[in-house]
Amino acid sequence: MEKRSSKIFVILWMAIGILALVATIERVVAGAWSAALFSLLIFAFCAYRAYQTYAVEDKR
């Protein structure tokens, strides 16, 4: 059950991260650099959490 739960969290972090990455690209194209930086930070956090969740799953 724990492996299934961690897979759901990885999918959740990846989905949010992809949306943040798309928002970052749109904001860079629009020239909104401060908003793009904020979206990029959200993407980085989601990528870190997905990696951390996936790495913990591999150690079990």
Image (cartoon, rainbow, N blue to C red):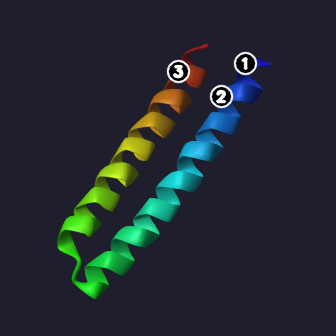
Q: Tag 1, which secondary structure?
A: helix
Number of the label disc, if any, that sits on residue 56: 3
- Against 41, is 45 above or below? above
Point 76% across, 28% down: residue: 4
**Badge 3 local density, few (<14 within 10 Å), some, or many (20+)?**
few
List the single residue furthest toward the bottom. 30
Point 45% across, 29% down: residue: 52
The quadrant in which the N terminus is found is top right
- Against 33, is 16 above or below? above
List the single residue furthest toward the right. 1
- The answer to whether the residues at label 2 and label 3 have Cβ atoms under 8 Å apart is yes
Give the residue type at disc 3. Val
- The answer to whether the residues at label 1 and label 3 have Cβ atoms under 8 Å apart is no
Give the residue type at disc 1. Glu
| Disc 2 from disc 3: Cα separation | 9 Å
Point 28% across, 57% down: residue: 38
Q: Tag 3, which secondary structure?
A: helix
Q: Nearer the viewer, mark 1 or mark 3?
A: 1
Point 36% across, 75% down: residue: 25
Judge left or right: residue 1 versus residue 45: right
Q: Which residue is mark 2?
A: 6
**Badge 1 local density, few (<14 within 10 Å), some, or many (20+)?**
few
Q: Which residue is mark 1?
A: 2
- Against 41, is 57 above or below? above
Q: Tag 2, which secondary structure?
A: helix
Question: Which quadrant holds residue 6?
Answer: top right
Number of the label disc, if any, that sits on residue 54: none
> Picture coordinates of residue 45 (x, y %)?
37, 42
| Disc 2 from disc 1: Cα separation | 6 Å
